[in-house]
Amino acid sequence: MARILIVEDEERIASFVAKGLRAEGHQPTVAPDGETALDLVLRGDYELVVLDIGLPGIDGFAVLDQMRSQGARMPVIVLTARDSVGDTVAALDGGADDYMPKPFRFAELLARVRVRLRAGESRPPSVDSLTGGQVTLDLRTRRATVGGREVELSAREFALAEVFLTHPEQVLSREQLLDRVWGYDFDPTSNVVDVYVGYLRRKLGAEAISTVRGMGYRFNP
Ligand code: CA
């Protein structure tokens, strides 16, 4: 059970999401605009935020930006109109953990909520950064460095790197990585994991992640 803040101005969507989360045993609170959301996020202790981008007054991007710059670190899942997914993906580097294009199925949102809550549980809240070999991930600012030099990682690359660094020297299968990072059933023939491992190798160093044939990938600190 988690305290979840839903930031959504469309009452129909807000109550649909709140009802669904309550049915799952969570404690949802709805904020109908950005100012209220910021107020609540900075005062209350929410474990996760579901954040709409199109809001009256300050929009979701500004809310995200302000909450991160004021040190709010809980996972954020952004809700966005399908036709502006491009902008949203670009803006994810502003500190969101995932996004959901609208309209969405509740089951899909729930799967992502589950993944984000689980990711938060898997490490003690006092941990601000993860280090493995040359690679350091600052979990607060979502910045990555290799040998002290900053590298730009997209939100998804960062999430994948986070999974690798929390399981050093462990072989992780494609399915495990899909589940942890993408959080729902992709087409099993999808090569999205391989593609992103390729991106990470380019940024973290080719030797950082080895391929274990027939099994998956392993991070070598
Ligand atoms: Ca809206």
Image (cartoon, rainbow, N blue to C red):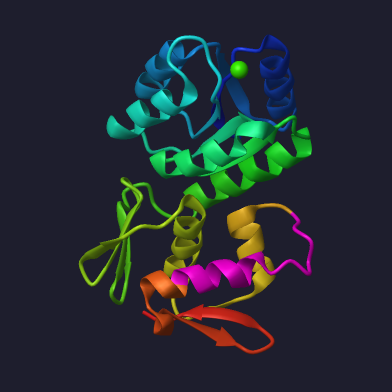
Q: Nearer the viewer, residue 160 or 61?
A: 61
Let me know if residue 191 is in the magenta part. yes
Residue 149: give x, y in percent of width and height.
22, 66
Image height of 209 relative to 139, above or below: below
Residue occupying image coordinates x 63% and y 29%: 26
In the rendering, at what x and y percent does residue 196 appear?
Answer: 55, 66
Q: Which residues are magenta?
A: 185-200
Image location of residue 114, percent across then percent down: 63, 44
Residue extending furthest toward the left: 148
Q: Does residue 149 appear to the left or right of 87 in the view shown?
A: left
* Figure quadrant, ligand 1: top right
Locate residue 93, reporting x and y percent. Answer: 42, 44
At x 45%, y 17%, the residue is 37
The answer to whether 214 is drawn above or below residue 201 in the figure is below
- Report which quarter residue 144 is drawn in: bottom left
| Residue located farthest toward the bottom when viewing the structure as drawn | 213
As drawn, is 170 to the left or to the right of 140?
right
Residue name at image x 37 percent, y 47 percent:
125
Tally of numbered tags: 0
Is residue 59 at least partly visible in the picture?
Answer: yes
Residue 45 shows in this picture: no
Locate residue 28 relative to residue 133 in the image: left or right: right
Query: Magenta segment: does it hold 197?
Result: yes
Q: Is residue 220 above or below residue 64?
A: below
**Is 48 left, or right, of 79 in this rendering?**
left
